[in-house]
Image: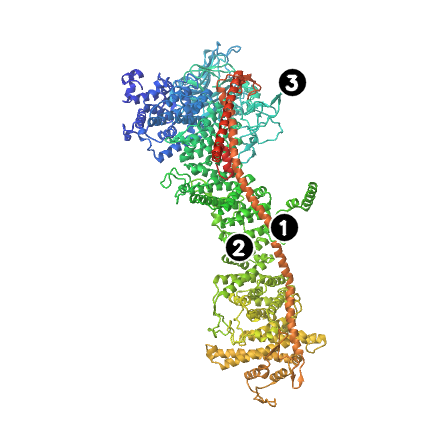
Amino acid sequence: LTAPPADLQSCTGTGKRKEVHPDREVGSLFALFEDLITPSLDAQAVANVVRREKMRWAPSDIVSDDVCDANFPPDPVFGKPRLAGGGPSAILSAIPPSDHFLSLPPYIQSALLRILMRLLTGDDDDEYNETCLFPHFESEFGPSDHGKATEEMHHKSFMSMKRMLRQVDDVSVSDRLFRVVRFCAYGTWGSKDRFAAVESLLNLFIAASSQVGTSETRICYDRHVLGPLARLLSLVTAVGISPRQLKRIIDLITGEVCPLETASPLPLSSRLLLLRLLKESTEGRLAGLSANSAAAPHSFFVLARGSGIIRAVQPGGGLLAAHAKGGPRWPFKTDWAASIWFRADSFGSPKVVKGRGVAGGSEVEGPTLLSLRTADGAGVEIRLVPFATGAATLTITCYDSVPTPASLSTRSLTSALQSSQPQTARLKGCVLTPRVWYHLSLRHTKSRFRGFSLGNAVRDEITVILDGKIMMQEALRFPRASDPSSAYTIACGTHFDGQIGSIHIFREFVSDSTLRALFEETAGKAPGSATIRTDNAWSIRRDSYQKGSSLSLLTKPSLSRDRSGIAASTGSDSSITRWGRLDMMHQNSYGGVMTSGSDSNVFDKTSQGGLVEQSLVAWPVPAPEPVSASIIDLGEDEDRLSCRSELTAGPFKSRLLLVWDPSRVSGISGKGVVLEAHSSLHASFGNGTVSWTIAEVPKDVIGSMGGVQALLPIFLALLGKETSIEVDTGQAGGAVLIPLLLAVLAAFVRGRVENAHAMVRCSGIDIVEFCLRQNRNRPGQGFFLSAMDALRSSEKAAQLLVFVLNDMRSASAHYPDLYHAVFSRLLFNFALWFGGESARLPGVSLYSTLLPELSVITREEPAAVARCLRMASVVEFIKEHTYLGGDENEVRKIDVQDQSSLFDRCNDQVDPSTPLTVAERRHAIDIALGIIITVMSTSTTVEHLSPLLNYISLNMDLEWKDSTTSHESRSETVALDANRTERHLATTKTCAGLLFLMEVRPPVPGLYESMTSYLSSKDTVCSWILCCVVNTFDDFLRSVGIRLLISYLEVISPSSSKLSDGADSDVLTTQPQDTKRKITKTMQAMGSGLGINASHMLSAVLRSKISVGVVYKLLWHLLKCHRERIGDASHAAMLRLLLVEDAPMTADAENALSPLEGIVVPDISPRGYCFHMGWAAKGPSTPHLGTDSRQRIRNDHAISTFLRLLRFFPNEMKERCLFDVVTLVRDNPRTIKAILINSDWQPCLFHLLSESIEEISSIQAKSSSSVEVDVSNDRGEEKPIRKPSDKLEPLPVPVVSRYDLIVKLYSSLLGHSIRQGGDNSFQSVEQAASLQRVCVNGHETFLVLLSHVLAELIEHGTIENAETSEDSDPLKNSAMIVTKAIVSNGSNGLSMASAVKQWRCLRHLSAVTVAVITTSGFGVTQLFDYRNQHTDGTDERSIGLHGMCLARGLLPGIAATEAAIESSFNTHGSDSSPLRRSRTCVTLASQLLSLLDAFIFPGALDASASETQLHGLALVRSAEPRLGQAQGPLLASLLRLSMLLLSHLEPSSVAFLQCCSRLRCLLHWTLELIRESAVSGGDSTAFCVHTAKLDRLVLAVVLQCHSALLKCSVVLMEIDSSPIGKYLVKTESKERNLKRTLLRSTLELREIVASAFGGRNDVLRTGLSLESYEELQLALEAPAPIRRKTQHNSGENQMERRDESASKEDKLRAFLNSAWTTGFHGVEVAGGEISVPIMVSNGQVYKNRTASKAGYEAIIALAKETEDITNDFGRCLDDPFNLYLEEQRKWAETDAVYDLEYEGDVAIKRLAGHHRNDLIEAVQSVVVRDAGSAKSWDGVERRVREPWKERKHWKLAEYCDMRHRRTLLVYNRHFDSHHDASYELMLEQDRKRAAKQRAERLMRKKAEEDAAANAASGDLEGEGDKQGNGAVSAAAGPDDMAAAMQRARQGIIP
């Protein structure tokens, strides 16, 4: 290749190469590879490679279209080249390289390497580019194209790097491995030793790396020459490397060894290639041996169609002969067996050779696996017979001896020839394929039966076992040797092309189990792998010992030593302990082995001088290596503990003839000899056979260099702070430095327990972390970056890092301690990858790759992450990324608006030098929160929860401070506002995540316990939630706090979520009474002993019980303070507080992560998860009220808190909350029952109603005019009679809406209570009545409430669910049910007790109504006062004629307008007469009478029947005792209410007519009761004791009828005398209807008066004046109309009678015109207040008769009854009012609330301080870890680097080494020469010290003189200040550690 063209023929020997191809270079390259492989290489393929390489180096010379892909033969077989030069190995190994390989043109170098590597690996051109061309340079083509690489090229390069780092498990790797073995074995270096190839190629690589060229040429050379060369070196290293060579490679990487040509270390590109070499060579051998289905041996013979291994045993003896007595004999008499491993690279082509068989026959030529033949031809041959397809089968041929003349003497020649014909058995049903390892076992047995022949019944049999399975068992004649003493030959591998392992030949019978055991034990496995034979092992995932795992403890009871030299001891009954818990940093010794940081072992000398075992800890040790042939056939039983029982030494050795093992050879190639130890049948092998062992791979060899810790200097050299190299930004490969380093470490740890153990013992992961952190903290300079900066700036490198970290995690999975260290120190080390200034520096690749990967791992293995993750580091990560900067410019730089894609610096939207933007920071925080929530969702500990609580507390504390702090600088204000916004957003997300964890049901294990434990008590947790999260200005955070409190109380105090009457069940912190007594006595004794008052101490210890009520009370106080900021979120949370609902997230029993589906959602990246708070912000936050019948009120405290807050809410929020409660009450009966139990519902609602009425009154008082009152009367008039003078403005709609909601809610609840009946009903009504004392407008409020309660009862009935159909009347249904029950005595419908209870409630309600109306100024005697009646012809509000006109149908409650009028007159007006309340009282009376009518006059009974009258009388004759005796029976109350209506209703209305009819019936019952009383009392006189009360009412009824008749007369005259259009707008039919109603009412009144006159005439005669009684008598007795003429002089009257056939109307008109009706309408005021009608008897004189004063006394008695009713009512309300006052007093006790709030504030400060302390501890822990890593590194340096250094000082060893060997001398690393103690040096030091002191004295003296001079000149002060400032500045500047700790105390992440 290097010779001139003229010398080409002399170089090659012939001129044929020139004929192959015209190009000299192509022909020469073809000549190198022509005889190297089979089939041979195509010359055109070589030409294509050369041309392509030329194009890469000089792209302008060749057109790329002419270049075709090079096609190489698939699966080539490497053989020994016939060229004298030795093929490519000769060029690669030639010395010096500069004169041979390096002298070739660069494109020839790259072409040679491309051809060679493609033949060795079997890769195509693209695969070669991906795996061999190291992807750390940007250019794909030549130097001129540098810098023009595309993103696709980068992607391909990094993907190839990822494939290179992956542990390959393809079958082709096995083929590659053995091709490399053949290449090394048959190369020019094969005759030296197995490591010669590594040495030659390593020297060549060093020489090539030292080549000097331009930067562009260097980049291309490194890529196309050094890359493939390093790849070739990795393949060669994978089949064997020596410790010194490995040490040399490591030294080259670290820079400790420099090339001879230069004094500087290798460039970074070459170091990276060497790192890849270590990685690939370490993984390549393991993958190659594990790729086959069957395992492979480690030692084998490599054969290339030669003679193989031959042993000829001659009868004459000799050096290699068997010197047995009598000479050598044929060893197989009756049985033989053989076992052999083989792998064929090629079986060759099938060829039939004639004449080769016996007797001139033909046979198929094929390689011979094994041949056992005697000199006379007897024996056996096992051949491989190839097929045309490339596969093969197996044949076993048996031969007998060739007949001799001596043998023919006993038999004929024909029979002798027939018996000597060979017999062949062919393996059927099994095809052997090339390049696959097989283990073949054969056993040939001769027929015998204890010496008796059985003929053909038992035949000779051959058995073939392939890979432990019997494949064939058939008859085959056993070979017969005529002369057993003749010579014989044993050959193996004749003409075989492949590999053959150990060969076992047996001379006796061997069982199938023995052959199978031999296969299993000789199968090659990775030595020292992680598999340990045991029954118990630790499981990584389950954190427990599981049967059948790959780790174990030694179980041998005595101290034993395994092959690796690690000793362990356990007892037979010792318990299994988790070995991964041992801390090697504190364990000074292990099992007598000297460890890091220790200069002593665990053995002490005894008095006898022996060694005693101190402490031996059970530790996992590697399983013994697979038992090789040297162990199986030579070792003793005690050396083969793991060997199968079938291979025990005695029986197994006795059957062996020979064992040819490839590891027992003398010489590896050429004239080598295979040594045999059993029968001395040593064998020789020729030039085509080579012995090879591939056990010396880097991960095994490194054990001889101090273990895997020998790799740690690489990390320190490349990444350390002081010695690390810098990565050029122009080389992309520098970014993969860190991933490549970690990949190498993973490769050495994978599958090796001893390496993993050594990594843990030396704290290797800590040292790696230390190096990475040092590299991260070192800033780049100019165009150079640190490896961490380069990694952070390259997305592909970051993806590679993710892959490598996962690979390292899987590689260390067999060793839990290392797995934990990798998990926590490398993978989930947030401070390492994202800490420091990462968020403020360019480069975001780790955020887009590693951070999502961490979330994926957390989602898949939350329990494993929880054990390894330091939660404080994740919280610090969140805190760091919320700080945007200190000035406005810095904030605006990263505040990118509308960022389309996150973590993308390839577009034009974000500059590549921009650090993390605001949107990216927020997304990173979401991912971190997703990790936190996922980890804590499985199980939570205090260590996990405390950083979260500390962070929330600090941020909330800072939020309060920032809200009250002002900043002058605008730039500072912008930055602080931005930081505050991000901090608040992060706090909100964190609180939302905590809320999710607390709302999950069933509860997260350990969450509530951890929170309670960390905050010391349950009440502290509640106070912290309230004071920290609820007490905030943000509405969403406040809602989260409320929900947090709800969730916490649900779990820790389940009784608080249920309604209970007792308060003790809700106590959070309780102490047993005996404990209290003990503490009391102890504190008192302590106080007396100390001479102090122990009361304060005692109160601190025995604190009052903090109940749930106190927690809710504090919540009420806080919400009241923030009432103006209550929004939708807080409103929804308050509803959750009020109601109990199913948890929004419920864990599935089968899938523990099911609640996370909507919380931690898939990320925008292809992989990853992030926290999503939409469930809390936009989800169904407001419960669907009324839609779920399972909804219920949470507890009594929640009701009180919710209702008490209503008073203080803004009007809009108040209306929303009222609507919610009304909806609940309407749709959920359980809600009503829960509210009624509460003691605060009535006071709260009463205050709300009072305030609403007050608001309405205020609005009306401010209005200057009022609007028309549109009230429809019963006449159906569409126009008012006249417009009132006062005009009222319409009320605002929200005001009316709130009023309606309040009265609707209050009336519904009170109505439901009344329907329940019993004492609770009485107490509810009385409590409502007692609350009128609380408010100024309390009386009016209660009147309005009572009106709506009555309306509600009328509308919905008095019995629950009384509505049987849509059209039915609930009130009538209720009355019918009660009536049927009473009539049937409880047999129909309700029980008698229930019916009586219902009626008692109505009777009590009637008594309360009468009492309220009476209190309002409408007593019986007050009705006589005409001043309280309307004097106008038309009522101003109802537009009624001489009275009120009520609405038709069911009367509704008092409307807002009416309430405003009533309240405004009484509160804001000066007129407080009862007239202003008249409409309310009239409405109440009408409603109550309508309610009772359904019961007194039931529709279910016949009205005309006497039973009906008796039923009604029975109902009304009883009295209500709860309100006193003043009211009398119910009948008396009804009479009072009827008289009120009679005096205020419009006479022409239907309601007035109904009132008259009802009064007539009531009067009839009254007369019945009077008669009964008179009979029972024996006295029927008027106003007697027994009948006085009812007699007075009869008199009052007559007086009210007299007044009503006058109004009827006036209205009738007005209608008759006025035009139709004045009052009516329609036809005369309306007039006739109006008159008819009026006349009917008049008739009813006349009948009432007549009934009273006839039924109780004595009362009228006594109670009325004489004149009025006479006129009454005349008016009632007059049959016809009377015209009256008065003569004033004589006083006599003349009357004329009409015809008796006068009409009924005329009679009524006559009655209306009578003197009694039209006269006697005056009143007299008695006592200044009592109005006495002039009609009653009061001693008047008429016709010389003097009337009695019985009437006057009756009126006075009625007034006294009115007062008594009022007084009794007031006394009845005292008890409920006192109860209300007691409840308010308890609520006003706020000491416990203040204590709880104080405790919460203290907790916030404490937790905020804990967060600051966590930051300080984080800094300190980093320093401590760095110090520990430095100390560990010192130990590593002693063990790894010092042995290779030149040592000058030694000392006697005190302890043994790791293998318990006594070492005489050890290195004295602490040698002291005592040079500093020399006399001369001490004198010199004394002289220097004296000179220094002299100089200091002179300086002080000069300073004093200067100070004196300055004082004299008056400048002393200024000079002093100057000196002081100088001193301060000189003293300033603390070290970095102190400054970092100070910043941490201030909450700043350093």
Q: Residues within 10 Å of mark 1 (few under 14, many from 20)?
A: some
Q: Is residue 767 visible?
A: no
Residue drawn at point x = 48 percent, y = 62 percent? 1293
Q: Which amino acid does label 2 sit on?
A: Asp
- Where does the image place residue 661, in percent across and percent down from the top left? 48, 19
The mark that comes first in sequence, 1 or 2, is: 1
Q: In this view, does 1752 lie above or below 731?
A: below
Front tag of 1 and 3: 1
Q: How far apart are marks 3 and 2 (CA)?
A: 87 Å
Q: Are marks 1 and 3 in contact (CB under 8 Å)?
A: no
Q: Is residue 1200 above or below residue 655?
A: below
Q: Which amino acid does label 1 sit on?
A: Ser
Which element carries disc 1, helix, strand or loop?
helix
- Where does the image place residue 788, in percent across and percent down from the top left? 43, 32
Q: What residue type is labelled 3?
A: Gln
Which element carries disc 3, helix, strand or loop?
loop
Front tag of 1 and 2: 1
The mark that comes first in sequence, 3 or 2, is: 3
According to the picture, the residue beneath numbered tag 2 turns out to be 1188
Q: How far apart are marks 1 and 3 (CA)?
A: 72 Å
Q: Residue furthest right?
A: 1578
According to the picture, the residue beneath numbered tag 1 turns out to be 1065
Q: Which of 54 and 1180 is in front in this view?
A: 1180
According to the picture, the residue beneath numbered tag 3 turns out to be 608
